[in-house]
Amino acid sequence: MSGSGRSYAAVDLGASSGRVMVGRVGYGALELSEAHRFPNRPVQVAEGLRWDVLGLYAGVLDGLRAAGQVDSVGIDSWAVDHGLLDADGALLGNPAHYRDARTEGVAEKVWATVPAEELYAATGVQYAPFNTLYQLVAARSSAQFAQARRLLLIPDLLTYWLTGEQGTELTNASTTQLVDPRTGDWAYRLAQRLGIDLGLFAPLRRPGDPAGLLRPRVLEETGLDGPVPVTAVGSHDTASAVAAVPAVGGRFAYICTGTWSLAGLELAAPVLTEESRAANFTNELGLDGTVRYLRNIMGLWLLQECRRAWGEPDLGTLLREAAGAPGLRSVVDAGDTAFLAPGRMPERIAEACRSSGQPVPGTRAEVTRCILDSLALAHRRAVADAQRLADHAVDVVHVVGGGTRNALLCQLTADACGLPVVAGATEAAALGNVLVQARTHGLVGDLADMRRLLVRTQPLTRYTPRGDTGRWRDAETRLALR
């Protein structure tokens, strides 16, 4: 790359691992490499399931040290979870994990004050039992919450430790169920009705806003020469991943694959109809005023948990065997919250098949094929429903994220949707993170310009639908009649 290029550290935190990637961007050029990867292991303690956020922060520091000198740093992670700080800015315990059981039954208490229909009309956020709103209601009677003077979402918490500056990045804030997607500001009236003090949140930031400079102590620990700015990016990893969809034109759907599958459309305005709420679509904010209109699907979590139960067998072998297993023999609802908690996943999948009168998968290959067929079927339903509800037709589906490595899932998704699938970029969240930082230095332009650069620089694989979609339609009907 020419000397006019710059280097950016993208801290990208997922549910099972974190990594620091280095992106090098020049005019018409984009390269990405991994500097450091580290585990993200939630811990079950007496009070519940918690994130080891100090371990994550140590991994970030190690990654910045390995990255070498960079022109900026950006952080993205999963959504909804947060840390609470006391009046001195000290963390009040490890953040609760979204899979923790503390929010069970909380949504019904919220709906008694603000009915679900009104909640959706105000925020456009789909129902999920772990939404930040429900976490706050579950926690507010605790001694820890009584001491809290500041709430920082996970990327903002790490940014605070790096810089000493507090802020709340908008794309992630939009997942809290406390933001009005029409205004891009807090839903003040809703929060007041529910007794939630929005003063707990730091001021809103938007992608591209400055988020402070690395503190002298951080520079010392990482060996970097200051000043090194931290830039607010699309700090919800899905926002960064959607920004890195290598699409030219607007007639596309996307599926961000990994532990979760996030399937939907990029729109100019939210869809807040009752029909949209009933279909459990969410309206989250993206780059440049866009709306991520999508449905959460359980994703490759199902297969990850099965592999863990089986002692981590080789994934490539499993997928080859699954490709030879009968297709659509049994399917489950990949969005069912029955699969949310960890543990006993093969048994739970077997029970779901048994209770719905379908053949019970008997081998690891059959369980794997059931999972992949079920995910492809969920992708089909989400893409079709999104087009109908938003009145926005598409002619291609872009798959980005870790699932792009799973050729069988990509092909099954093309078959199920009856649309071509373009797979890539694999490191979409990190690439979107890097490109927002690069934009602050004028190396790329608007969202369309970012995507043109991705098309030119990233390896992409196209999957053409095989046969008609009749078998998938029959499986969809069978699942709906459970």
Image: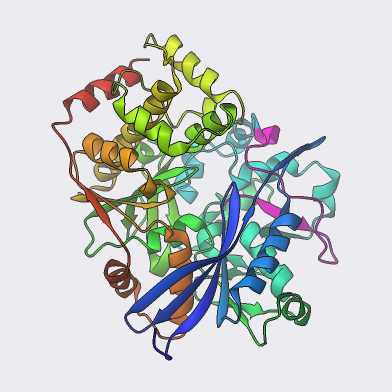
The N terminus, quarter of image: bottom left
Residue 224, located in which quarter of the rendered image?
A: bottom right
Please name the residue shown 13% across and 31% down the image.
Answer: 468
Relative image position of residue 157 (x, y in whole percent): 69, 63
Q: Is residue 217 left or right of residue 195?
A: right
List the single residue furthest toward the left: 467
Name the residue nearer the viewer: 189 or 317.
317
Q: Is residue 302 left or right of residue 358?
A: right
Is 65 in the magenta? no
Is 78 in the magenta? yes
Q: Is 33 rendered above or below residue 472?
A: below
The C terminus, quarter of image: top left
Specify whether residue 118 is in view.
yes
Q: Which residues are magenta?
A: 77-103
Relative image position of residue 32 (x, y in whole percent): 45, 69
Relative image position of residue 466 (x, y in whole percent): 16, 36
Please name the residue shown 63% across and 71% down the image.
Answer: 66
Residue 439, located in which quarter of the rendered image?
A: bottom left
Q: Is 206 rendered above or below residue 225?
A: above
Relative image position of residue 448 (x, y in whole percent): 29, 71
State the count of labels.
Answer: 0
Please name the residue shown 73% across and 62% down the image.
Answer: 58
Q: Is residue 198 left or right of residue 282?
A: right
Specify whether residue 165 is in view.
no
Please name the residue shown 42% across and 28% down the image.
Answer: 368
Q: Is 415 rendered above or below residue 211?
A: above
Predominant secondary structure in magenta?
Answer: loop
Name the residue nearer the viewer: 200 or 21.
21
Residue 182, located in which quarter of the rendered image?
A: bottom left
